[in-house]
Image (cartoon, grey):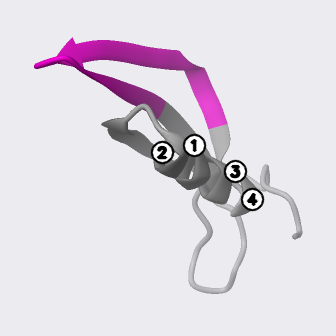
Amino acid sequence: MMEYRFLTGPDDASFCRRVTEHLNDGWTLYGGPALTVNEGIVIAGQAVTREKKDAQGFCSRNACSTE
């Protein structure tokens, strides 16, 4: 099973750290970033996906890494 998350927040260093943390935790970028402006603040969004492991730590389609 594929897991999907859409990370959002102000376009700042904190948002970049959150995306980096997900990448370091085995997530993969899904598409490009999205940007919008809300009351003068730039809001960023980035989708990430990863293969979900079962209770024994195996991937559902044998597609994820052994890390």
- The residue that label 3 is drawn on is 23
Work out which residue is located at the far bottom of the displayed protein and give it.
56
Image height of 38 relative to 45, above or below: above
Give the CA distance from mark 3 to mark 1. 11 Å
Image height of 57 relative to 22, above or below: below
Tell me if 67 is positioned left or right of 41 in this view: right
Residue 37: name its quadrant: top left
- The residue that label 4 is drawn on is 24
- Of badges 4 and 2, the one in the foreground is 2
Q: Nearer the viewer, residue 50 or 14?
A: 14
Choose the circle earlier in sequence order: 1 or 4: 1
**Residue 67, percent across and down?**
87, 70
Give the CA distance from mark 1 to mark 2. 4 Å
Q: Residues within 10 Å of mark 3 (few under 14, many from 20)?
A: some
- The residue that label 2 is drawn on is 15
Q: Are the residues at dot 1 and dot 2 in contact (C-beta closer than 8 Å)? A: yes
Given the image, on which type of amino acid does mark 2 rest?
A: Phe
Q: Secondary structure at mark 4?
A: helix
Give the CA distance from mark 4 to mark 2. 14 Å
Q: Secondary structure at mark 3?
A: helix
- The residue that label 1 is drawn on is 16
**Magenta range:** 29-46
